[in-house]
Amino acid sequence: MRRGVMFIAPVIAAAIALCGCQSVMFSPEVDGLLAKMKRAKDPKGTLANATTKTIVGTFRTSTKDRPMKMTLRFKKPDKMRVDVDTPSGKFIKACDGKVAWSFFPKKGLKNLKGHVLRETRLQALLLSPGVDLSKIFESIKLKGAAKVADKMCYKFVCTPKKEFGSEPMTFYVDKDTMLIVERDEKIYTASGKVLNAKTFFNDYEPADGVMMPRNIITYANGDVAEFNVESIKWDADMDDSIFDLPTKM
């Protein structure tokens, strides 16, 4: 199960939103492209007032025959919870904005520290409705163009702020649709191992007007993981307590 669980971090990128900035913060050229991405992803402005996001789907790796139900919940500005129904029981990973924790079946509750804590906080901020990229990235730079699956794409290199202790992420954005088609990054596992991960975003469809990928495939460490989205809901009621570190499970 450990090989499957370690893929959850990159697959969480199912909800990634590298857009939303309309004023110049990084450079006029980059900011102009981010504005185009925002209009392509959210033409109706749904995300402007959204406070929560719930994504439900199935998650599987090449080592597991049976898909596992996966529920991702995000609350503005920096709260996240992921639940996966594994064959051994429920796996949970959560962040209340400052504290992050996980629960593994048969292994118990763990208060996350170090790289894993910083990475989880970064994920929670990135995936929040109405993300503010200026609070996350030190810089976003356009590094020319590249082809991904026969699509000509803009290549963006995004460097997180030092407080997150993360390596730069590379995003590839389809020039025709202005939607993200690939994300390359380094992922830290709980054991401190670093994985080079490539995530591909496929089958975009609108969810209340917001274009969201419905199939996400991640390659890392010689393995593959796939997340298929079944439903996306904005502004569902979420009590803050579901993100808090419990005293026991």
Image (cartoon, rainbow, N blue to C red):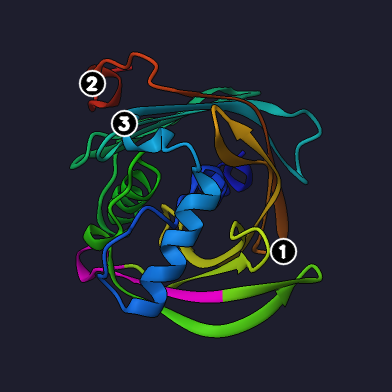
**Disc sitting over residue 222 in the figure:** 1
Q: Give the x, y percent position of residue 4.
A: 63, 43
Question: Is 160 colored magenta in this rendering?
Answer: yes
**What residue is pinned by disc 2?**
240
Q: Give the x, y percent position of residue 217.
A: 69, 51
Q: Nearer the viewer, mark 1 or mark 2?
A: 2
Residue type (three-letter) at the residue carrying disc 3: Asn
**What residue is pinned by disc 3?**
49
Marks 1 and 3 sit apart, C-alpha to C-alpha, by 40 Å
Q: Give the x, y percent position of residue 225.
A: 69, 47
Viewer-closest of 174 and 56: 174
For the C terminus, give its image quadrant: top left
Q: Are marks 1 and 3 in contact (CB under 8 Å)?
A: no
Q: Secondary structure at mark 3?
A: loop
Q: Secondary structure at mark 1?
A: loop
For the N terminus, give its image quadrant: top right
Marks 2 and 3 sit apart, C-alpha to C-alpha, by 18 Å
In the image, is residue 46 above or below residue 12?
A: above
Question: Is 122 colored magenta in this rendering?
Answer: no
Residue appearing at x 26%, y 40% in the figure? 78
In the image, is residue 107 above or below residue 78?
A: above
Residue stretch in magenta? 155-165
Q: Give the x, y percent position of residue 11.
A: 57, 47
Residue farthest along the bottom direction in this orientation: 144
In the image, is residue 185 above or below residue 43?
A: below
Disc with the residue nearer the chain's start (1 vs 2): 1
Residue appearing at x 33%, y 58% in the figure? 21
